[in-house]
Amino acid sequence: MKFKIVNGKVIDPTQNLDGKIQDIFVENGFITNPSTAESAKYNIVYDVKGMVVMAGGIDIHSHIAGGNVNNARLLSPEIHSNFLENNLKRKSFLPGFNSRWTSEGTGYRYAEMGFTTVIEPAVTPINSFLTQLELEKIPMIDKGCLAIVGNDHFLLDALNQQRGQSYIDDYVAWNVNSSKSLGLKVINAGGTELFKYKGESENFGLDDIVPQYGVSSRKILEALNISNENLRIPHPIHVHCNNLGMAGNVDSIIDTIDAAQGRRMHLAHIQFYSYADEGKRGFSSGALRLAEKINKNQNISVDIGQVMFKPTITISSDIWKQNQAKSNAHPKKWVISEVEDGGGGVIPYEYKQKNFVNALQWSIGLELFLMIKDPWRVFLTTDHPNGAPFTSYPELIRLLMDSDFRNSEIDKININAKEIGNIKSIKRTYNLYEIVIMTRAAPARILGLKDRGSLKPGSVADISVYDPNKSIDDMFRAAEYVFKNGNQIVKKGKVLTHMKTVTKCLNLKYDTKIHKKIKSWFNNYYSLSLDEFEVDENFFTANNFQEIRS
């Protein structure tokens, strides 16, 4: 199929285009660059005069599938009615047309907003098979996932026994390949094992030792970062730092940046680690200190995990932290699960404007967005659903772009939080070009997805078109047109058709002799055999998985 999009204002940072009127040509699912004579043969025309054209959105960190997500659905079925709020009625012929927080609803809602690729950032390898089945079920958007390592006993034993870096590299590669992942996620390195052994602790620093194994959190993180580098995994190691949510934890994340020793590292949902312990309540913003550190360290990229004021549900494989937070559940119900090399916590919660801590969390996230200078290294996330559902993105983008709107919202928050924070003094606003960097071009680059995030010829035809005459939040809430692989899937914010999509993954090279060691370990210590942990492509639709080059 051939078509062209004409008269649109193209915003594409990969080509340094900032509103240039330029036609986009699409053939067989890819953007093309036909000759003048050939361009006349593109008879299907979308005239988008006055509108802005950009690549499809890419979300680098959103919990959309897996055991914790499904436990959250079971725990709080009432959230289905409003979690992914959408007043746009869908066609009844669409599978799950009226669903919200389900596989279908997740895909529809992302597409309606103009997103075409989403990464599930935390897949426990022992649950990867079921997670991948669920990811396959999500329509409209391409998917990818990150494999959780860092608290698994095989790794900790290898470090304790000093098996060597190549041994660890092989184990890491097996984890990525067997779970069909795009990279590595480390969650509170060693902290879950500490919790299982010791129970409650006040904090867990990088140099604290994991009981039984005699290795530090720093050592775990360093070994995995070196593996990521040795295996040439495109995405830097994706780190959930120690001591999430605790006053004074800004020290932990700054220590983690130093521990990277100049190696690439991506720090996830950093709003939750940006807390100082000053002031009468012992809780204050550490955003300025952290932003300055990030600005000086070009090897570090981050996503924010912005809090927004609405009911949500927190889910995390950080069992230690979730166990601490269960007393804050609203309503009073929660799930803490502990399984082989994994588990998680699920806690419903509501962020409120007049609550001092919540208001300061909201402010801190915005401070980080506005004080980190390089939009290529900071990514738009709410850590869905932990800070807020991803459907909050349009309002969040308006907070970043519209200073009058931001100031009016600042006036509504807890007065003490407003006074102790920095947000009211920050004048910076994002422009549309910077928003496109952080939601399109930069995520594609950092994930190693070279075929998207761009409107260059040769890129996959994932394209979003928006009406800039609307308010910023309305503009991003409902795209005028969305094309996925060159197929029109959305018009005026409404899904037109159900579309099956793919899951991106890596296929790393490593010494397969490690299989024998892993199998022996599983036979000795696990309740299921090794075969039941490896994702079997025979259970999936043909070509569901698409490998990218490492």
Image (spheres, rainbow, N blue to C red):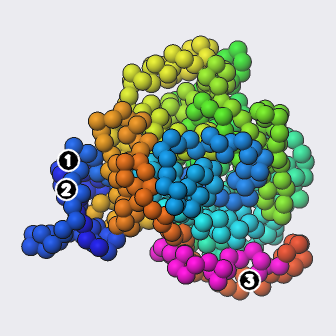
Between disc 3 and disc 1, whose residue precedes?
A: 1
Which mark is drawn over residue 369?
none
Q: Which amino acid, by three-letter code, is at mark 1?
A: Lys
Callout 2 crowding tier (Cα within 10 Å): few <14, some 14–19, many ≥20: some
Q: Quadrant of residue 43?
A: bottom left
Are the residues tagged 3 and 1 within 8 Å (C-beta)? Answer: no
Question: Can you give x and y, in whole percent of width and height, for residue 279 in the image?
Answer: 67, 17
Question: Can you give x and y, in whole percent of width and height, for residue 413 in the image?
Answer: 57, 19
Q: Secondary structure at mark 3?
A: helix
Q: CA distance from mark 3 to mark 1?
A: 57 Å
Between disc 1 and disc 2, whose residue precedes?
A: 2
Which mark is drawn over residue 6?
2
**Residue placed under numbered mark 1 in the picture:** 49
Q: Is residue 471 magenta?
A: no
Q: Nearer the viewer, residue 550 or 51?
A: 51
Are the residues tagged 2 and 3 within 8 Å (C-beta)? Answer: no
Q: Residue at x 50, y 68 (%)?
A: 501
Q: Residue at x 22, y 65 (%)?
A: 44
Question: Can you give x and y, in whole percent of width and height, for residue 240 in the image?
Answer: 65, 49
**Residue placed under numbered mark 3 in the picture:** 515
Q: Is residue 121 left or right of residue 393?
A: right
Q: CA distance from mark 1 to mark 2?
A: 7 Å
Q: Which residues are magenta?
A: 529-550
Callout 3 crowding tier (Cα within 10 Å): few <14, some 14–19, many ≥20: some
Are the residues tagged 1 and 2 within 8 Å (C-beta)? Answer: yes
Question: Can you give x and y, in whole percent of width and height, for residue 467 in the image?
Answer: 31, 42
